[in-house]
């Protein structure tokens, strides 16, 4: 990790911004894969059931 931090510190500002954007996109892709895996294995089923129940009870609020 220290090597990565050292290499980043040597980058030009424009390259740091490009790297930051790439990292943001990479993190989002990781999140998407984890969410898909959790959905496939059923880990989200209880949350989905709870959300549907609360919606049916009128506890949902409109999303802005």
Image: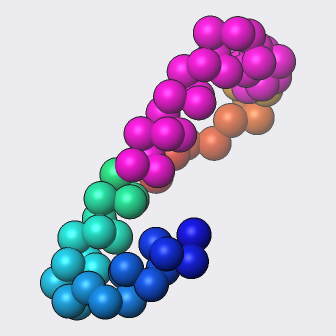
Instruction: Tell me, yes or no, if residue 11 can be seen here.
Output: yes
Magenta extent: 26-52
- Report x, y in % for residue 49: 78, 15
Question: Is 39 a magenta residue?
Answer: yes
Instruction: Tell me, yes or no, if residue 53 can be seen here.
Output: no
Which residue is the extreme one toward the left? 14
Residue sitting at x 82%, y 18%: 46
Question: Is 13 a magenta residue?
Answer: no
Residue sitting at x 73%, y 20%: 44
Image quarter where the N terminus lies is bottom right
Residue 37 picture quarter: top right
Residue sitting at x 63%, y 42%: 61
Give the dominant element type of the magenta stretch: helix, strand or loop: helix
Residue sitting at x 20%, y 89%: 12
- Report x, y in % for residue 51: 74, 25
- Report x, y in % for residue 64: 46, 52
Residue 11 picture quarter: bottom left
The residue closer to the viewer here, 57 or 15, is 15
Which residue is the extreme one toward the front? 3
Residue 19 picture quarter: bottom left
Is 25 situated left or right of 61 in this image?
A: left
The residue closer to the viewer here, 16 or 42, is 16
């Amino acid at each position: 990790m220290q090597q990565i931090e050292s290499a980043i510190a040597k980058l030009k500002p424009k390259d740091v911004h490009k790297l930051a954007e790439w990292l943001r996109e990479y993190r989002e892709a990781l999140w998407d894969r984890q969410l898909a895996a959790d959905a496939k294995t059923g880990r989200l089923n209880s949350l989905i059931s709870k959300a549907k129940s609360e919606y049916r009870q009128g506890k949902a609020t409109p999303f802005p």
